[in-house]
Image (spheres, rainbow, N blue to C red):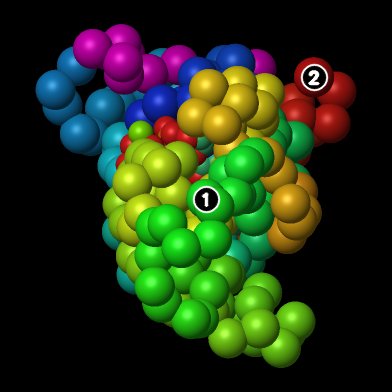
Amino acid sequence: MVTIALSKGRILEESLPLLERAGIVPVEDLGKTRKLIVGTTAPDVQVVVIRAADVPTYVRYGAADIGIAGKDVLMEDGGDGLYELADLGIARCRLMVAEPRERPPAGEGHSWTRLRVATKYVRIAQRHFDAKGIQADIVHLYGSMELAPLVGLADRIVDLVSSGKTLAANGLVEVEHIVDVSAWLVANRAAVKMKYKALRPVIECLVGGAMHG
Ligand code: PRT
Ligand code: MG
């Protein structure tokens, strides 16, 4: 059995056509089903549908043999014990530092001295500001980072941007580019050795489909 870890949301939407080209079609609508393990039309291939940030963990421990995860998630995770096999070129966006278009007038708002940065990407943000020699206090949030500067929780945010509409709608502007992001195919190291025969066609089709899509 080959198990593929996928996450709901935009990565799933863009992964399904790649899987389909590899002859792997889930037997249930992954957007609707409440099942977390779903068989596919390919013999001995199943998918597990999990939180985006959990994909590296499932693959690292071999609970899934391969998975599809954003480069943002892989960088934040550290990627130890995983093979990053190929950039699938899907779910593209960029990881940015953003701040309010208009800074609050002096005297108003916060009184802290160090830069405060709200993000879900604590490790990436810390590394980014360390590398620039800027002392930053990182505030860990799980979502809606764009809100933080509007309510005085942080001066800046580190978040993903694709169209830029969310930033604009909240009066924020991009001030630094950290890294371009897309989804990657990752694999468990032991599985690549032990299950090579079963995994090879799946991996080749997914990578081939991504290159020719
Ligand atoms: O749902 P869960 O909490 O488990 O995770 P999640 O919400 O992070 O998952 P999901 O489905 O959003 O997928 C996340 C993955 O998709 C990320 O890890 C990226 O690799 C990829 N991706 C690509 C994006 C975006 N583009 C993106 N634009 N993930 C999130 N966004 C968000 C961004 O955080 C911001 O809030 O969309 C908003 C900005 O979009 P624009 O178009 O307004 O700029
Ligand atoms: Mg989500």
- Nearest to the observer: residue 169 or residue 46: 169
Left or right: residue 8 versus residue 126 is left
Report the quarter where the N terminus lies.
top left
Q: Where is residue 177, by image quadrant?
A: bottom right
What residue did someone put label 1 on? 104
Q: Is mark 1 within 8 Å of ligand 1?
A: no
Which residue lies under the disc numbered 2?
213
Q: Is residue 58 above or below residue 112?
A: above
Give SS at disc 2: loop
Residue 163 percent coordinates (x, y): 67, 23
Quarter of the image where one finds residue 202: top right
Which one is closest to the eye, mark 2 or mark 1?
Answer: 1
**Label 1 neighbourhood size at 10 Å, few (<14), some (14-19), many (20+)?**
some
The magenta stretch is 21-32
- The spot of residue 96 in percent (x, y) is 67, 51
Residue plotted at (36% across, 30% down): 8
C-alpha gap between disc 2 and disc 1:
46 Å
For marks 2 and 1, the one nearer the N-term is: 1
Mark 2 close to ligand 1, CB under 8 Å = no
User: Residue 31: percent from the left, percent from the top?
Assistant: 31, 15
